[in-house]
């Protein structure tokens, strides 16, 4: 009789943890390079290459084209035909980046996410023009750096403290001032 009761409770647990419940998405998270978290938001790349984010949407943090919050994972808007391979979330109100299947960096959020002076934010993942294709991209609060396929490292974003590694700082501007 006890075994039957256990089986019954086990069935109930399995029902409650079903992938069809809100908050679960179809697909698997494959590794630490496909998942990143901040204090108020998170993103994951699923096995189908879709990038899903949730949490605080302030500063276009979720890559959905708006600043709405979401308690459930929502798909970031990626360029047609491309899938995500790596994601790195910068600071809470900074920018976030992903490497897509075309081996380029795409960034979104606040703080000069695409490295273009005069463009302070991108509401969806937007191509960052770099000198070569991207092997890995990492983001911080207001700047990002990528390891490129030609063996170099290239950084963009805020350079107030010299974090771009270009040999000087910029007091009120980004990049090479």
Image (cartoon, rainbow, N blue to C red):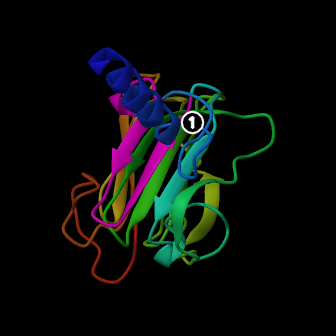
| Residue 42 vs residue 157, the one in the foreground | 42
Identify the image quadrant of the C terminus: bottom left
- Vertically, is 60 above or below 172? above
| Residue 73 vs residue 12, the one in the foreground | 12
| Residue displayed at 22% across by 64% down | 168
Quadrant in which residue 122 is drawn: bottom right
| Residue displayed at 56% across by 78% down | 118
Q: Is residue 138 visible?
A: no
Identify the image quadrant of the N terminus: top left
| Residue 57 vs residue 24, the one in the foreground | 24
Helix, strand or loop at disc 1? loop
* Position in image of residue 161 (x %, y %): 18, 68
* Position in image of residue 90 (x %, y %): 34, 57
Magenta stretch in the rendered image: 29-46
Quadrant in which residue 158 is drawn: bottom left
Q: Residue furthest front?
A: 1
| Residue displayed at 69% across by 54% down | 77
Residue behind mark 1: 19
- Crowd class of label 1 (few under 14; some 14 to 19; many from 20; radius 10 Å): few
Quadrant in which residue 56 is drawn: bottom left
* Position in image of residue 167 (x %, y %): 21, 56
| Residue displayed at 31% across by 16% down | 3
| Residue 38 vs residue 86, the one in the foreground | 38
Q: Residue furthest right?
A: 80
Q: Does the magenta stretch include residue 35?
A: yes
Q: Is residue 173 visible?
A: yes
* Position in image of residue 64 (x %, y %): 65, 63
- Vertically, is 1 above or below 58? above
């Amino acid at each position: 009789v006890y075994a039957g009761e256990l089986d019954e409770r086990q069935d109930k647990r399995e029902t409650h943890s079903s992938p069809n419940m809100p908050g679960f998405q179809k697909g698997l998270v494959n590794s630490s390079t496909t998942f990143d978290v901040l204090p108020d938001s998170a993103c994951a790349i699923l096995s189908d290459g879709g990038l899903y984010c949730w949490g605080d949407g302030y500063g276009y943090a979720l890559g959905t084209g708006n600043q709405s919050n979401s308690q459930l994972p929502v798909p970031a808007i990626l360029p047609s035909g491309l899938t995500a391979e790596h994601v790195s979330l910068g600071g809470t109100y900074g920018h976030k980046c992903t490497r897509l299947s075309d081996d380029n960096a795409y960034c979104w959020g606040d703080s000069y996410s695409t490295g273009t002076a005069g463009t302070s934010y991108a509401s969806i993942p937007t191509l960052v023009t770099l000198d070569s294709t991207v092997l890995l991209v990492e983001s911080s609060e207001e700047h990002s750096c990528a390891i490129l396929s030609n063996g170099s490292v290239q950084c963009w974003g805020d350079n107030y403290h010299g974090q771009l590694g270009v040999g000087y700082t910029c007091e009120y501007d980004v990049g090479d001032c």
